[in-house]
Image: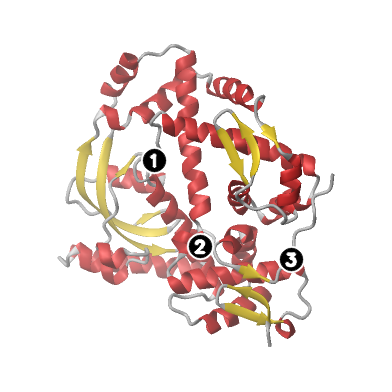
Amino acid sequence: SEAALRVDGVGYAEEELLGLDTRRRARLAGLTALGIAVARDELGALGAPLVGRREEELVLERFRAVLALERADVEEEVLRAHYETNPRHELVVRHVVALAEPSAPEAVQDSARRKAERALDRIRSGEPFPRVAADLSEEPGAAERGGLLRPGRRGSWVSEFWRAASALKVGEVSGVIRTQYGFHVLRLEERRTVPFGEVRDEVALEAAGMIGGTEEAWSAWADGVGRNVAVDTAALGGWLRGGVADSASLARGPGIRYTGAAFRTFLATRTEERRRELRSGPLAEAARVLAGEAVRAGAVQRARDRGIAPPPGAEETLTRKWEARAMGWAASLGFEARLPLEEVKVRAREALGTTRQNARLARDEAAQRGPLLRAAYPVEGLEPPVPATP
């Protein structure tokens, strides 16, 4: 029979959906999208809107710092002198990781720890680190790279990982290190001193934190721009009802054109509840949020025009963090790489109804990212959004 709900190549007949209200059907669609992404090794693409949002936050953090320094008349020579007293380093690291979130059952954590210890034993016995990483590391792509990470700087990695890597001498191997992702074994390949020009934004951020006034400078800038941003409430209402194209302008301001596509991407990064509130709640609230997002988009563009960028390796770090979280959900819910789509369908339905504690926790956490999961693939058959109320 014809599919009543379809997520990319996975379809559900109406009889397979009996008893499921709209919200549970949406949850099933999200779980199916997660399973498809794991099966196809597309978790990076699945999380791209969220990763992009977080990259923008890093850009905005640096932009706010620049505004504060300009307001305080801090000159370039001051920043350079500050850097020379505390130069930055870039590290090249290989690692092996056995994934296990802190919330995982003790048996899962013990198994991951033992796996990392086996890796360490093999390395200390003289086996090449890349070979051990290819055999044992659970990070996506580790086999092809031999566990080699892109060069990292302070802030590129979680603090426990950075501290462990920073403490090593070149060629030295760490013991087993615990982070929020699991258990790691590291080897430092290279340590480089970073030129001032490459870390100027980071130095500015640190200096702004020392002098203060960042929020005041940002508020003054954002308020000035916001006064000149106009939301087209008729277009916004039409877009929320599905009658206005994504290419339409929903807000305009100085150098700003904020479209339905941009607002759709923003909504994909919200929780399920917040997305529902904005799509079906008062139009005035959606307009208020959209105006703020238009100002934010203008700030990101202004920052990039001035050469402000996220830290090197930020995209990889954020993507890796997202993939580790999503793989944790997938492992608890039974999704695996290269699963046939028909099996993805079976496991998604099982995940929706599971009563196992760990699987239920993973399902509920993933469900809060339902808008993100469903945005990655074409979804047909969910009820249209409730029109925004005036």
Which numbered mark, 1 or 3, is in the foreground of this view?
3
* Visible residue check, residue 355: no
What is the quadrant of residue 140 in the picture?
bottom left
Q: Nearer the viewer, residue 317 or 306?
A: 306
Q: Residues within 10 Å of mark 3 (few under 14, many from 20)?
A: few
Is 45 displayed left or right of 388 in the figure? left
Q: Nearer the viewer, residue 188 or 8?
A: 8
Q: Position of residue 188 (x, y in %)?
A: 22, 50
**Which is more N-terminal, label 3 or label 1?**
3
The tag earlier along the polypeptide, 1 or 2, is 1
Q: Residues within 10 Å of mark 1 (few under 14, many from 20)?
A: some
Find residue 206 and report its horizontal and vertical position in percent.
41, 26
Identify the residue under disc 3: 23
Q: CA distance from mark 1 to mark 3?
A: 38 Å
Callout 1 amino acid: Gly
Question: Which residue is at the far left?
Answer: 126
Which residue is drawn at the image coordinates 48% and 56% (left, top)? 322
Q: Nearer the viewer, residue 182 or 19?
A: 19
Q: Residue furthest top?
A: 73
The residue tagged 1 is 155
The image shows residue 307, relative to residue 279, as above or below, that is above
Front-most of 240 and 323? Answer: 240
**Residue located at (48% from left, 55% from top):** 48
Q: Amino acid at mark 3?
A: Arg
Q: Quadrant of residue 5?
A: bottom right
Residue farthest to the bottom, as pictured: 1
Q: Give the SS element for disc 1.
A: loop
Q: Which residue is mark 2?
A: 326
Q: Is residue 328 above or below residue 214?
A: below
x and y, in percent, of residue 87 in the image: 27, 28
Viewer-side label of 3, 2: 3
Q: Quadrant location of the C terminus? A: top right
